Amino acid sequence: MNKVTRNWMINGTPHRVETPPLRRLLDVLREDLRLTGTKEGCGEGECGACTVMVDDEVVLACLLPAGQVPDGAEITTVEGLEKTPGGRLLQEAYAEKGAAQCGICIPGMIVSSYALLRRGPLQAPDAIRTAHAGNICRCTGYKKIIAAVEWAAERWPETVTPTE
């Protein structure tokens, strides 16, 4: 079977990956690299549990073939956010507001929250809802998640820049 070789920067660490080109990025992350924070919910791109960032763009890892992730790409998973002030703040916010329940959707929610907040101050009242439109939570009803993102937005560290 044909394989592609990619050199990716994942959560700030270089990784050389050899994989079949149609293998899902989700499987490479979870099975090959043991980055199990990214979850599989539906496997069809409907729930957002597998949300990661590739070159600062939010993507669904269950839909993205590894062969389509370019050589040299920067991939950020929820584990990588633990290394950033903004990611740690979001984890605190989700805990503070009781936004985390079963844990399946939370990694994708936090990645979506991070992508939103690092763009700068919230401009539209519905910006949080829009940024999380692709993430389904079956436990919280979203109010606590929205409250957590608002809480984090009020405290967003000045050290966080669009290139964090």
Image: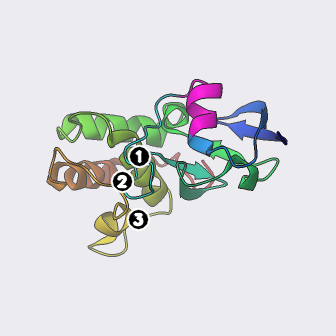
Q: Earlier in the sequence, mark 3 or mark 1?
A: 1
Quarter location, residue 24: top right
Q: Is residue 1 left or right of residue 93?
A: right
Q: CA distance from mark 3 to mark 2?
A: 26 Å
Which is closer to the viewer, label 2 or label 1?
A: 2
Q: Residue 14: where, in percent of width, then height?
A: 77, 32
Q: Is residue 94 left or right of residue 156?
A: left
Q: Residue 123: where, in percent of width, then height?
A: 37, 74
Find residue 108 and name its label.
Answer: 1
Q: How is the image coloured?
A: rainbow
Residue at label 3? 121
Which is closer to the viewer, label 3 or label 1?
A: 1
Find residue 47 and name its label.
Answer: 2
Circle 1: is it few (<14), some (14-19), or many (20+) Cα within 10 Å?
many
Find the magenta span and give its range: 27-35
Q: Residue at x 75, y 41 (%)?
A: 20
Q: Secondary structure at mark 2?
A: loop
Question: Taking 142 as reference, is 86 above or below it?
Answer: above
Amino acid carrying mark 2 in the image: Cys
Extreme-front residue of the structure? 1
Q: Residue 162: where, in percent of width, then height?
A: 58, 57
Q: Earlier in the sequence, mark 2 or mark 1?
A: 2
